Image (cartoon, helix red, strand yellow):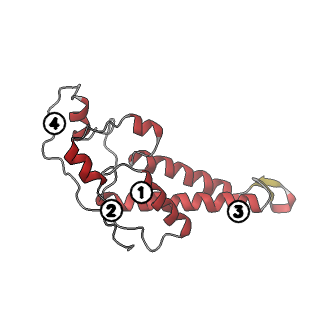
Amino acid sequence: MPLPGPKPKPTALKVIEGNRGKRPLNRREPKPKGELAGPPSWLDATGKAEWRRILEALPAGQVTALDWAILAMYCERFAHFVAAIRRIRRSGGVLVKGYRGVTTKHPAVQIARDAANDCARLGAELGFTPSARSRLELPELDEDDAASIMRPTRVRGGR
């Protein structure tokens, strides 16, 4: 059962933004470590391509090894969305002949809608949407930090 009220803002964002609410900061909030593994082996080609596209576009540290499963779910749902849209287009559109010739909505329309909603929800959790990014503020980096972020990182193979 979800907790009531808005989702709490991560402590790092409170520090960056200046803790406007002046509430005590959680100094013991977990800080995920580790490099992000490669895409799971069970993702299809579309999901793996989306995984690579996302990792190339994200700033360093936005998605960590702890976020592997959520990113995998996002990529899987994205692949479902693409497959549903392709099926709709191959069959001639969103309306099809149903039982006894009655025109009805193509079943893949609901699959595409559900996948799009899941992608939007998961993407917002990971900071992929414009509104989610507008709430993020990255700290200014000194030269040592910038050099360490620009250094290439090793990505482990898929699971």
Q: Give whichever of discs 4 and 1 has the lower sequence position.
A: 4
The front one of 140 and 131 is: 140
Q: Are the two marked residues, 3 and 4, in contact with CB atoms closer than 8 angstroms? A: no
Check disc 2 and report the residue beneath it: 36
Tag 4 secondary structure: loop
Q: Amino acid at mark 3?
A: Arg
Tell me where residue 20 appears, x and y as whole percent: 23, 25
Place residue 86 in its image quadrant. bottom right
CA distance for labels 1 and 3: 28 Å
Residue 87 image label? 3
- Against 84, is 156 above or below? below
CA distance for labels 3 and 4: 49 Å
The front one of 39 and 52 is: 52
Tag 2 secondary structure: loop
Q: Are the two marked residues, 4 and 2, in contact with CB atoms closer than 8 angstroms? A: no
- Mark 2 Cα shell of 10 Å, populated few (<14), some (14-19), many (≥20): many
Name the residue: 15% across, 36% down: 25
Q: Amino acid at mark 2?
A: Leu
Q: Give whichever of discs 1 and 3 has the lower sequence position.
A: 1
Check disc 4 and report the residue beneath it: 25
| Residue 27 horizontal side relative to residue 154, left or right | left
Q: Give whichever of discs 4 and 2 has the lower sequence position.
A: 4
Q: Amino acid at mark 4?
A: Leu
Q: Give whichever of discs 3 and 4 has the lower sequence position.
A: 4
Q: Amino acid at mark 1?
A: Leu
Q: Quadrant of the C terminus?
A: bottom left
Q: Are the two marked residues, 1 and 2, in contact with CB atoms closer than 8 angstroms? A: yes
Q: Give whichever of discs 3 and 2 has the lower sequence position.
A: 2
Foreground mark, 1 or 3?
1
| Residue 122 horizontal side relative to residue 107, left or right | left
CA distance for labels 3 and 2: 32 Å
